[in-house]
C-alpha cells in the first residue's frame, strides 16, 4: 500500500494505491491463444431404416387380374363396381360409358378408350376393384 | 451529304446474309415440310411490323473443329422485342437451319441479353425452342451458355411471365430452360422433349421405348405433366401463347389486364340451378359450371390432360381476370391426389405472383385413398396445395358447390386457409368425414350394444349427415360468408371480385417460405 498525493488543477488529493504482485502488473499481457477444447461431437445420423428394405405390401391379386392389354378399360381408382352398361359381345364406340364405379361416396363413370367389341368383363357388380384393375376388355 | 452508296450496299448485303439464315435450300426444305422458319415464327407471333431485332449481326465465336470459315447468321437464334395486343414482349426463336439450331456461346449470350432486358423492363419473355442441343465444337463454352440461361430463367421467375414454346427437338440439359419457365407449349408433332432418348435408355437399361412414349407432347401433357398446352401446329402454339398473355400482366408489379364491364350485373342464371344432380353420388362436369360463370364461356384451361380430377385455368368474370381452381367430380370422384396437388399448387403460385385473383370451386370428397398415393408422398404433395393457398395474398374467393370433406376441404382454400370470402350452395356438405365413418368412431360402443347394430348405425349416420350434410352448421360458426343459389353465383362473384380487388396483405419479410417439394 502506498500513499500518494495527486494535484489536479491546483487542488491536491491524497490517494491510497495498493501495489499488487509486480509480475502481474508489469508483465506484458500475452494472451495465451484460446483454443477451444476440441468437442468431439458424435455425428448425428438418422436411424437406420429397418434392415429389410421397405417394399410395397403385396396386395392379394384380385381374381382374374389378367395383365392389361391395349383395349382394356382400367379402373381409375379403387372402389366398388356399381354396374356395367355393356355385356360381353356388345359393340362399343369410343367414349361410350361402359361401367360405373363407386368410390369416395361418388359414382365415377367409366368410358371406353377405343371402339370395338367387348370380349371380357372380369369383375362383377358389387366387386371391389383396385386402381388399375381391368373392368372391361375391348378388342 | 447523303450517306455513301457503298455503305448502304454493305449493309444491304449483310442483311441479305442474315435473312438467308442457313441457306435458301434449307429454308425451302422446311417450307416443303410445312414448317415455318425461325423468323416467320416471330413475325407470326407479333403484330405485323413491330419486331425490333437484337444482335442480328452476331456471329459464332467458336472457330475450331471445322467452324473456322463457317458463318452462322445470328448464331442460330433470332432475338428481339415485338408487340402483342399493344404490349411489348421479348422473344427468341432458335433457327434449326443454322448449325442445327445448336447453342454456342454467342447464341447463349443473345438469349441472356434478352432475358436481362426483359427483367429490367418488366416484359413477358417467350422462347421458341428448336435446337439440336449444345454446339459440341464449342465445348464447355456451350455448356456454360446453358447455365447462364438457366440462371436468368430463375432470376426472371416471379418477375415476368415466361413461356416456352417447343416446335422442334429439345433434349438433354437443354430441357431445363423450358422446365424453369412458367408454361410450356408443345406442338403435337415435330416437337420432342427428353433427357435421355430411346437409344440411351436402351443402352443403359435394355428397355425398349419409343420416342412417342417418352418425348412427345401427348406423353408430357397427359403422363409426366411436364407441359401445359398441346398445339395442333406452330400457328396454334403461337395463338395459345398470345391468349395466355391476354390474361397476365407484363410483370409482378402490374395488375393483370382487367377489363371491368362498365356496369355490374347481378342477373340470375337459372340454368345454374340444374347442374348439381339431386343424387349426391352422381357426378357432374365442373367445366359446365365454369362455362356459365365466366365471360362468354372463354376459359383457357391449363394442363387439361393432366390430373383431370382438378381443373385450372384463367377467364374473366365481368371483365375481371381470375384464376380458377375447381374439383372435377366426373374424374376420380373429384378427389385430390399427388398430381392434382402439384398441378393446382403451381397454378395458385403463378396467380399469386402476377396478382390474379383466385376463385376456387369445391366439390371434394377427400384425398384419394390408396397405397400408391401414400407411398408416393401424398402428404408432402398435398401440403403444397395448403402451402400455396395459405401463402397467396391475392383475393381468394371460394364457392363450395357440394362436398367439402376433411383435410381436402381445408386444402381447397377454406376460410381458415385465408379465403377472403366463402360462398356455399344449399347443396354444400361440410364435415370432417362422411356420416357412416364418423358414427363408427363416435358411437362405436353404442352401436355394438344396440339390439340392431346396423339399424342403430344407420340412424346415427343419418343424424350426423343431417347436421353436417348442409352448409348451415358451418355457416352458424361463421366459416361461410353466405349461402347463395347457384343461379346467383356469377353476379355475386363479379361483385366479390370488385370489392376485393384492392386487397393488400403484408406478411413477415423473409427470403422465401419452404414449400414442401
Image (cartoon, coloured by chain):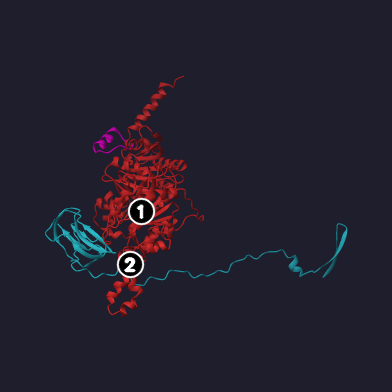
Chain colours: A cyan, B red
Q: Is residue B218 visible?
A: yes
Which of pointers 1 and 2 lies earlier in the amino acid sequence?
1
Crowd around label 2: few <14 · some 14–19 · many ≥20 (10 Å)? many
Badge 2 sits on which subunit? B
Asked if residue B4 lies left or right of residue A37, the reply is left
Q: In this view, does A79 lie above or below B170?
A: below
Q: In which quarter of the image is residue A132?
A: bottom left
Query: For the residue labelled by badge 1, is the local secondary structure a helix, a strand or a loop?
Result: strand
Chain identity of mark 1: B
Name the residue tied to disc 1: B325
The region drawn magenta spans B22-38
Q: Give the x, y percent position of residue A72.
A: 19, 59
Q: What whole-number distance in Å separates the C-alpha atoms at marks 1 and 2?
A: 27 Å
- How would you rate the neighbour count of disc 1 (Cα within 10 Å): few for under 14, some for 14-19, many for 20 or more? many
User: Closer to the camera, B158 or A92?
Assistant: A92
How far across and down, in percent of the image, does residue B111 sit? 40, 42
- Quadrant for the C terminus of chain B, please: bottom left
For marks 1 and 2, give the one nearer the viewer. 2
Residue B340 percent location from the top left of the image = 33, 57
The residue that label 2 is drawn on is: B465
Amino acid at each position: 500500500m502506498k500513499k500518494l498525493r495527486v494535484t489536479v488543477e491546483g487542488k491536491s488529493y491524497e490517494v491510497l494505491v495498493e501495489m499488487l504482485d509486480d509480475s502481474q502488473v508489469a508483465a506484458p499481457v500475452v494472451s495465451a491463444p484460446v483454443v477451444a477444447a476440441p468437442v468431439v461431437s458424435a455425428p448425428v445420423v438418422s436411424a437406420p431404416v429397418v434392415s429389410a428394405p421397405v417394399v410395397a405390401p403385396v396386395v392379394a391379386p384380385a381374381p382374374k387380374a389378367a395383365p392389361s392389354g391395349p383395349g382394356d378399360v382400367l379402373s381409375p381408382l379403387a372402389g366398388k363396381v356399381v354396374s356395367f352398361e355393356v355385356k360381353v359381345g356388345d359393340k362399343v364406340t369410343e367414349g361410350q360409358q361402359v361401367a360405373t364405379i363407386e368410390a369416395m361416396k361418388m359414382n365415377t363413370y367409366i368410358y371406353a378408350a377405343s371402339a370395338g367389341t367387348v370380349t371380357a368383363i372380369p369383375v362383377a357388380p358389387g366387386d371391389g376393384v383396385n386402381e388399375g384393375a381391368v373392368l372391361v376388355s375391348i378388342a | 451529304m447523303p450517306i455513301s452508296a457503298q455503305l448502304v450496299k454493305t449493309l444491304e448485303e449483310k442483311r441479305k446474309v442474315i435473312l438467308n439464315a442457313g441457306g435458301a435450300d434449307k429454308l425451302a426444305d422446311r417450307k416443303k415440310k410445312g414448317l415455318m422458319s425461325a423468323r416467320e415464327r416471330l413475325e407470326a407471333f407479333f403484330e405485323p411490323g413491330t419486331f425490333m431485332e437484337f444482335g442480328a449481326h452476331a456471329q459464332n465465336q467458336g472457330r475450331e473443329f471445322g467452324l473456322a470459315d463457317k458463318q452462322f447468321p445470328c448464331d442460330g437464334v433470332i432475338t428481339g422485342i415485338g408487340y402483342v395486343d399493344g404490349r411489348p414482349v421479348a422473344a427468341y426463336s432458335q433457327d434449326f437451319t443454322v448449325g442445327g439450331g445448336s447453342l454456342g456461346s454467342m447464341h447463349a449470350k443473345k438469349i441472356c441479353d434478352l432475358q436481362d432486358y426483359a427483367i429490367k423492363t418488366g416484359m413477358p419473355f417467350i422462347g421458341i425452342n428448336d435446337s439440336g442441343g449444345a454446339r459440341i465444337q464449342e465445348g464447355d463454352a456451350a455448356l456454360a451458355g446453358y447455365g447462364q440461361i438457366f440462371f436468368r430463367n430463375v432470376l426472371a421467375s416471379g418477375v415476368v411471365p415466361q413461356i416456352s414454346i417447343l416446335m422442334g427437338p429439345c433434349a438433354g440439359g437443354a430441357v431445363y430452360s423450358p422446365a424453369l419457365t412458367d408454361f410450356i407449349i408443345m406442338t403435337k408433332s415435330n416437337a420432342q422433349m427428353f433427357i435421355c432418348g430411346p437409344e440411351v435408355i436402351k443402352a443403359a437399361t435394355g428397355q425398349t421405348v419409343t420416342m412417342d412414349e417418352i418425348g412427345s407432347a401427348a406423353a408430357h401433357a397427359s403422363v409426366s405433366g411436364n407441359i401445359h398446352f398441346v398445339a395442333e401446329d406452330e400457328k396454334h402454339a403461337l395463338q395459345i401463347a398470345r391468349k395466355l398473355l391476354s390474361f397476365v400482366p407484363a410483370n409482378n408489379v402490374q395488375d393483370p389486364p382487367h377489363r371491368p364491364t362498365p356496369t355490374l350485373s347481378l342477373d340470375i342464371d337459372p340454368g345454374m340451378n340444374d347442374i348439381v344432380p339431386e343424387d349426391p353420388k352422381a357426378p357432374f362436369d365442373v367445366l359446365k359450371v365454369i362455362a356459365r360463370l365466366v365471360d362468354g364461356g372463354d376459359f383457357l384451361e391449363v394442363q387439361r390432360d393432366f390430373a383431370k380430377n382438378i381443373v385450372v385455368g384463367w377467364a374473366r368474370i365481368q371483365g375481371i381476370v381470375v384464376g380458377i381452381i375447381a374439383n372435377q367430380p366426373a374424374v376420380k370422384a373429384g378427389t385430390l391426389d399427388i398430381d392434382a396437388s402439384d398441378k393446382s399448387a403451381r397454378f395458385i403460385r403463378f396467380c399469386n405472383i402476377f396478382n390474379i385473383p383466385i376463385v376456387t370451386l369445391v366439390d371434394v370428397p377427400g384425398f384419394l385413398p390408396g397405397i400408391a398415393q401414400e407411398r408416393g408422398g401424398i402428404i408432402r404433395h398435398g401440403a403444397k396445395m395448403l402451402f400455396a393457398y395459405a401463402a397467396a395474398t391475392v383475393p381468394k374467393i371460394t364457392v363450395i358447390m357440394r362436398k367439402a370433406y376433411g383435410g381436402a376441404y381445408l386444402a381447397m382454400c377454406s376460410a381458415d386457409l385465408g379465403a377472403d370470402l366463402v360462398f356455399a350452395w344449399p347443396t354444400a356438405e361440410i364435415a370432417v368425414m362422411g356420416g357412416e365413418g364418423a358414427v363408427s368412431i363416435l358411437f362405436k360402443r353404442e352401436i355394438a350394444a344396440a339390439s340392431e347394430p346396423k339399424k342403430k348405425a344407420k340412424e346415427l349416420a343419418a343424424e350426423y349427415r343431417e347436421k353436417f350434410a348442409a352448409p348451415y352448421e358451418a355457416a352458424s360458426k361463421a366459416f361461410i360468408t353466405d349461402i347463395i343459389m347457384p343461379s346467383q353465383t356469377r353476379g355475386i362473384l363479379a361483385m366479390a371480385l370488385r370489392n376485393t380487388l384492392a386487397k393488400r396483405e403484408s406478411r413477415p419479410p423473409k427470403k422465401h417460405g419452404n414449400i414442401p417439394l
